Image: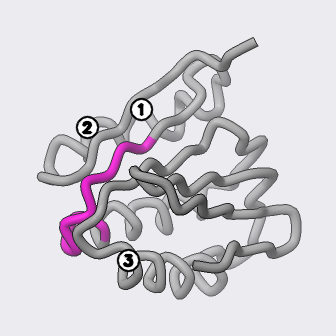
């Protein structure tokens, strides 16, 4: 699976077990769904039934519009039975504010778990 590089955002895929999908840089798209949703759909098709970690620890910024694409990822990966752990940097206030509500949403899905982690020094 190819990585996505668009503007200041890179989504890097490491074919490990579990698969690691790392979001790096900044997501400031005016319409993030136009860029992210087709790529997320390809990820869902490629990794159906596998295990994945979606890592936001190196994401420096995202606008509120990006949250919709992350919710789409959660719904799609759950439908595709992709056992997914989403990790975010709970030390960064903006990530805690953005992802804490997703922890509750993750409880509604069988295959999605959202966890805040401390950044390693």
Where residue 94 sits, quadrant-wise, is top right
Q: Quadrant of the N terminus?
A: bottom right
Where in the figure is residue 78, as x and y percent of width and height?
A: 22, 64
What residue is shown with label 2?
104
Where in the figure is residue 76, as x and y percent of width and height?
A: 30, 73
* In this view, 103 is above or below 66: above
What residue is shown with label 1?
100
* In this view, 100 is above or below 37: above
Measure the C-alpha gap from mark 2 to mark 1.
7 Å
* In this view, 117 is above or below 58: above
Frontmost of labels 3 and 2 is: 3
Where in the figure is residue 97, as x and y percent of width and height?
A: 53, 31
Disc 1 element:
helix
* In this view, 75 is above or below 112: below
Where residue 9 sits, quadrant-wise, is bottom right
Circles 2, 1 touching at the beta carbon (< 8 Å): yes
Q: Nearer the viewer, residue 120 or 99?
A: 120
Neighbour class for label 1 at 10 Å: few (<14), some, many (≥20)? Answer: some
Residue depicted at x 54% and y 34%: 88
Residue segment shown in magenta: 77-86
Residue depicted at x 67% and y 63%: 11
Judged left or right of residue 32, residue 88 is left
What residue is shown with label 3?
44
Measure the C-alpha gap from mark 3 to mark 2.
22 Å
The answer to which of marks 1 and 3 sits earlier in the sequence is 3
Is residue 81 found inside the magenta-colored segment of the image? yes
Measure the C-alpha gap from mark 1 to mark 3.
23 Å
Residue that sits furthest to the top in the current view: 121
Q: Nearer the viewer, residue 67 or 88?
A: 88
Where in the figure is residue 113, as x and y percent of width and height?
A: 28, 41
Q: Quadrant of the C terminus?
A: top right
Disc 2 element:
helix
């Amino acid at each position: 699976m190819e990585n996505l590089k668009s503007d200041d955002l890179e989504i890097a895929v490491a074919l490990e077990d579990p698969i690691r999908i790392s979001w790096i840089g900044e997501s400031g798209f005016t319409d993030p769904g136009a860029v992210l949703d087709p790529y997320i759909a390809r990820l869902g098709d490629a990794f159906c039934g596998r295990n994945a970690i979606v890592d936001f620890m190196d994401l420096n910024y995202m606008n509120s519009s990006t949250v919709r694409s992350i919710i789409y990822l959660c719904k799609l990966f759950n439908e595709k039975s992709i056992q997914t752990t989403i990790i975010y940097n709970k030390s960064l206030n903006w990530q805690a504010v953005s992802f804490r509500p997703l922890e509750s949403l993750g409880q509604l899905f069988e295959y999605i778990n959202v966890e805040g982690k401390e950044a390693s020094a």
